[in-house]
Image (tube, rainbow, N blue to C red):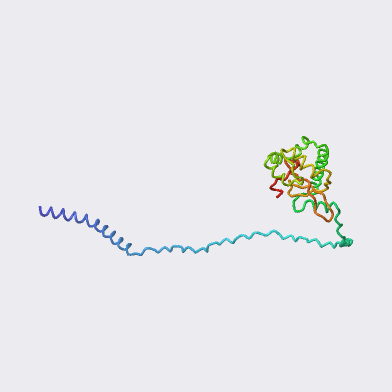
Amino acid sequence: MYDEGMKISKISIKKLIPIFACVLTSFFISCKSSNTPAPVVEEPVAEEVAPVVEEPKIEEAAPLVEEKVPEPVSEEPSPVQEEPAVENQEEPAPTPEDDEYTRSVGAVAVDRNTFADDKEKVLKIISELDEIMKNMNYKAWVPYVEPASVDYWKLRKNLQKYEKRLPVKGIKLTDLQAYFKHVFVPARKGREVSEIRYISDTYIKAVQVREGQEDIIYYYFNKINGKWMVHLPTNEELN
């Protein structure tokens, strides 16, 4: 049995030797190939590319057009017309109407047209009163007198105070009609009134002008609702 075992082992070894030799050969080849350095492959070096800088576009300016300056036209100066020298003219001398206007208005702001209109109306009333006084027409006289004066001189106490002023003593002023007869008419009948004097623009006096002397006042007028009416001075105003 030992011999058969030995035979079998020898046979087995003989079969294994070629296999082992192949394996060993492969091993050596493998080791040799592993010791051989791998070829170095050089990578291509990338060349650095400089960045492209875009230059700013320069817009072409429009060609300048030279403006032609018009040449100055030499105009001949127009001849200067000399104005005739104005001789110093003297202001016209004031007329009598100017003098009267100044006297009548004084410091009151009244224009010439208003003055002329007022004077015409007042002198017309005085002319009508002259006729009334000639006829001693009391009833026609009352409407010319302002209401305030009528009311004042109707009072007996006011008439009694005025009695002391009468040049003729013993006359009794019993009522307004007696005042008209003994006071108003004698003081004004036949008198000449030529001008007016403004106390205000609604209150005037009618006067007789005497050259070189003071004016004599015969009437007072108040403008009431645009109408000139006779004002009879009160005792207090006469004092």
Frontmost residue, 98 versus 203:
203
Frontmost residue, 197 versus 2:
197
Where is residue 88 drawn, in percent x and y? Answer: 87, 62
Q: Residue furthest top?
A: 139
Frontmost residue, 69 versus 162:
162
Is 206 situated above or below 32?
above
Residue drawn at 69 percent across, 42 percent down? 160
Residue 105 appears in the figure: yes
In which quadrant of the rendered view does residue 12 lie?
bottom left
In which quadrant of the rendered view does residue 161 lie?
top right
Q: Residue furthest front?
A: 170
Where is residue 3 drawn, in percent x and y? Answer: 11, 54
Is 214 situated above or below 202?
below
Number of numbered discs visible in the structure rendering = 0
Residue 82 appears in the figure: no
Left or right: where does residue 184 sit relative to residue 25? right
Where is residue 16 drawn, in percent x and y? Answer: 22, 55
Left or right: where does residue 160 sit relative to residue 19? right
In which quadrant of the rendered view does residue 225 lie?
top right
Left or right: where does residue 153 sit relative to residue 86? left
Residue drawn at 56 percent across, 62 percent down? 53
Where is residue 200 drawn, in percent x and y? Answer: 73, 49
Residue drawn at 86 percent across, 57 percent down? 93
Q: Residue furthest left?
A: 1
Residue drawn at 36 percent across, 64 percent down? 37
